[in-house]
Amino acid sequence: MADQTTRDNMPPIRLRDIWPIDNVRDYKVHFGRWNRHTQPLDEWVRSPLNWVGWQEYRPKKNDFSRPYIFSLMNFYPDGQRTWLFGGVFKILTRYEDRYEVELTDQGKPFIGRLKLRSDYTGRTVRVNFEHHYDGSYPLDVMEILREPYSGRVFPGYEKINL
């Protein structure tokens, strides 16, 4: 039994261990978090199409300056460092006030199922992917859910926000 590995000293499984991505510099990662109005995870639960709008939002500056968006939403039931994969989006058009995006097939089986952990706590939510795939803030695999997360929207949510 001396050669048996315990859970405490197991190295983390990194995103790059389960999902090879050739050109990480073609991606920005979007850490979708509470925007002072809505939790992105709640938007996902209401409708995954609502999550698309989070990718289309464009602040004054062109934050999504690369062809693809690797989108993550804060999985707040597990804390601020847990993220649920929301898809890879291709930017079709960059307008002054928004982006036109299209969901790709990349990682499609992981959408709503792949939970990742990151120690990144910076304020910037649209950042270069290579720092999180290979770099200083690697994405660790927490779990892969059997089915896409469907959660439960608080029944009084609509009444509160009228």
Image (spheres, rainbow, N blue to C red):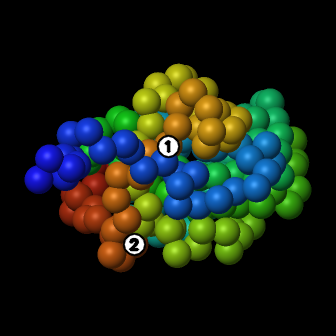
Outermost residue toward the top in this view? 122
Circle count: 2
Residue 23 location (% of width, % of height): 79, 51
Give the structural element (helix, strand or loop) at label 2: loop
Between 17 and 67, the one nearer to me in the picture? 17
User: What residue is at 87 percent from the left and 49 percent from the top?
Assistant: 94
For mark 1, give the secondary structure.
loop
Residue 40: x %, y % from top left? 45, 50
Is the residue marked by circle 2 packed among few (<14), some (14-19), or many (20+) residues within 10 Å? some
Q: Amino acid at mark 1?
A: Leu
Q: Residue furthest left?
A: 1
Residue 38 seen in this snapshot: no
Q: Which residue is mark 2?
A: 148
- x, y percent for residue 84: 44, 54
Q: Residue at x 14, y 47 (%)?
A: 2
Q: Which residue is the site of mark 1? A: 139
Left or right, 23 with respect to 81, comes to right
Q: Amino acid at mark 2?
A: Pro
Q: Of the residues under marks 1 and 2, which one precedes in the sequence?
A: 1
Residue at point 50%, 68% (across, down): 110
- Identified at 74% across, 47% down, the residue is 24
Find residue 148 and report its image quarter: bottom left
Q: Which mark is drawn over residue 67?
A: none
